[in-house]
Image: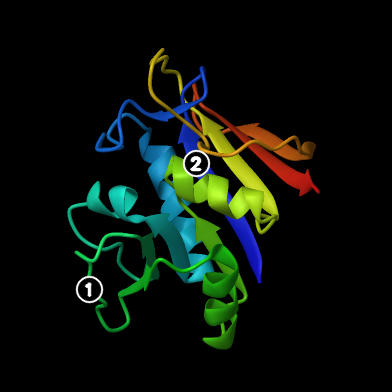
Amino acid sequence: MKITMIMATTVDGKIAKTATHFPDWTSREDKQFFAKESKKAGVVIMGGKTFNTFPRPLKERLNVVITADKGYENIKDSVKVYYKKSPKFVKKDLEKMGYKKAILGGGAFINGLFLKNKLVDEIIIIVAPKFFGEGLSLSSGFYFNYDLKLLDTYKINKDSVLLRYKILY
């Protein structure tokens, strides 16, 4: 299964001001791109804090929540919760369910887990015209040093740029 991380970041590389920061700062085009790609994949992988930033589960795709918090419930055909499961276990389980592609949608710790385990094939970053200074980085909690190969770049609107990279493990 191919896993593509899709994240909007500020120019200074932040994905949010805090763990509970609702992603209302990204552009309409960013949201449309994420919706299109994640619906095409059929599944979005995220942590519990990221899932909590949405008012309801994302429609027309499986919302996979990886968490250590028991406060989440499975919802048939909508939400699948993995309680204290490894990224490798989640990937294998999704493959058994027939998924060929998944979108990794954050947050910082879940991104780090998947990157540490070398499970992310591509990273798509949409750089928004924002600067937070303090905030959450693209990943946290882990150290890695991977090279990337630029596959594509283009403007998605007058002020935001999309960068697509392959990770060279």
**Residue at the image point whose x is 55% and y is 45% from the top:** 112
Mark closest to the chain's N terminus, 1 or 2: 2
Q: CA distance from mark 1 to mark 2?
A: 25 Å
Give the answer, above or below, for where 5 lies relative to 64. Answer: above
Instruction: From the viewer's side, name the closer residue of 94 and 128.
Output: 94
Instruction: From the viewer's side, name the closer residue of 58 and 97.
Output: 97
Instruction: From the viewer's side, name the closer residue of 24 and 140.
Output: 140
Image quadrant in which you'd find residue 2? bottom right
**Residue at the image point whose x is 20% and y is 60% from the top:** 56
List x then y, in percent, for residue 128.
46, 25
In the rendering, which numbered label is found on residue 131? none
**Residue at the image point whose x is 52% and y is 66% from the top:** 86
List x then y, in percent, for residue 124.
60, 43
**Residue at the image point whose x is 62% and y is 76% from the top:** 100
Left-right relation of 89 to 71? right
Estimate how packed mark 1 is, as few (under 14), some (14 to 19) or many (20 or more) residues with alpha carbons within 10 Å.
few
Give the answer, above or below, for where 31 lies relative to 120. Answer: above
Left-right relation of 112 to 2? left
Q: Which residue is mark 2?
A: 7
Left-right relation of 93 to 169? left
Residue type (three-letter) at the residue carrying disc 1: Glu
In the rendering, which numbered label is found on residue 73? 1
